[in-house]
Amino acid sequence: MRMRFPRGGAVFVSAVFLFLLTVCIFVGVFRWSGRARSTVKLDLEYYLLVREATASTAGSVAGDSYLAGGAGYLYDVGGETVVVLSCYYTERDATVVQATMSERGVQTTVLKRTRGNFSVDGGGGKSARIAANAKTLDSCARLLYDTANGLERTQLGQDDARAALGGVVQSLGGLAEGNGESFYGLWNVELQRVQRRARETGEGIVFARDLRYLQVALCVLNLEIERYFA
């Protein structure tokens, strides 16, 4: 399920840059604008490669997908459960892998999902902070995507993978700490949940499928971000 691969050193640079970016975002002060509602401005687009499942087969399909190298992430789509194998940033990348999976006898579907603007209670400070959260999650997800690809191609090693995970753990922790107040309570719980899994992943041997799971989890959080602030 690999598509593009960075050079080893790029991961270390990206991890450091990601952490510094998060710090810079939250050093600034988001001012209250006084408006009753404000707009969170986002333009995110993901292509999820999924296998269909039923309530009774979802667990086994997820397990099989994970053992085969996919994320094995359970995701609800309109009341139906699907198993996400991986998340891509272009339709072409997703369909190329879909064709490869089909040749192996595994039928998949590509789901295009977007996250655009939405409104929240509160002024521009809140909407700007939420947008910064989403964009940082997107950066973390892309770092994990590149690292997973590099591991599969053996262009990256365990130290590279742990460096990338360390950058993600620091970034998610910085987001939750910077968010602070109760308005972000439910969202912070999700950030901390993924942060905890990322930290635990880095404590053992890191596999590409584990990085894919975390990447998909972050992409799904971004897709569903509006409901945490409705």
Image: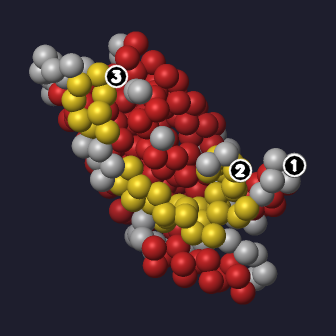
Residue 113 is left or right of residue 63, and the answer is: left
Say above or below: 97 vs 20.
Answer: below
Residue drawn at point x = 61 percent, y = 77 percent: 98
Q: Earlier in the sequence, mark 1 or mark 2?
A: 1
Say above or below: 223 vs 13.
Answer: above
Disc 2 element: strand
User: Which residue occupies the foreground of this view, 200 or 84?
Assistant: 84
Residue behind mark 2: 81
Q: Position of residue 126 (x, y in %)?
A: 25, 25
Disc 3 element: helix
Residue behind mark 1: 56
Question: Can you tell which quarter of the image residue 118 is in?
Answer: top left
User: Which residue occupies the foreground of this view, 56 or 197?
Assistant: 56
Q: CA distance from mark 1 to mark 2?
A: 10 Å
Residue behind mark 3: 179
Circle 2 residues within 10 Å: few <14, some 14–19, many ≥20: some
At label 3, the amino acid type is Asn
Residue 66 is left or right of residue 225, and the answer is: right
At label 1, the amino acid type is Ser
Q: Which mark is residue 31?
A: none
Circle 3 residues within 10 Å: few <14, some 14–19, many ≥20: some
Residue 88 is left or right of residue 109, and the answer is: left
Q: CA distance from mark 3 to mark 2?
A: 31 Å
Closest to the camera, between mark 3 and mark 2, is 2
Disc 1 element: loop
Q: Position of residue 144 (x, y in %)?
A: 49, 55
At label 2, the amino acid type is Thr
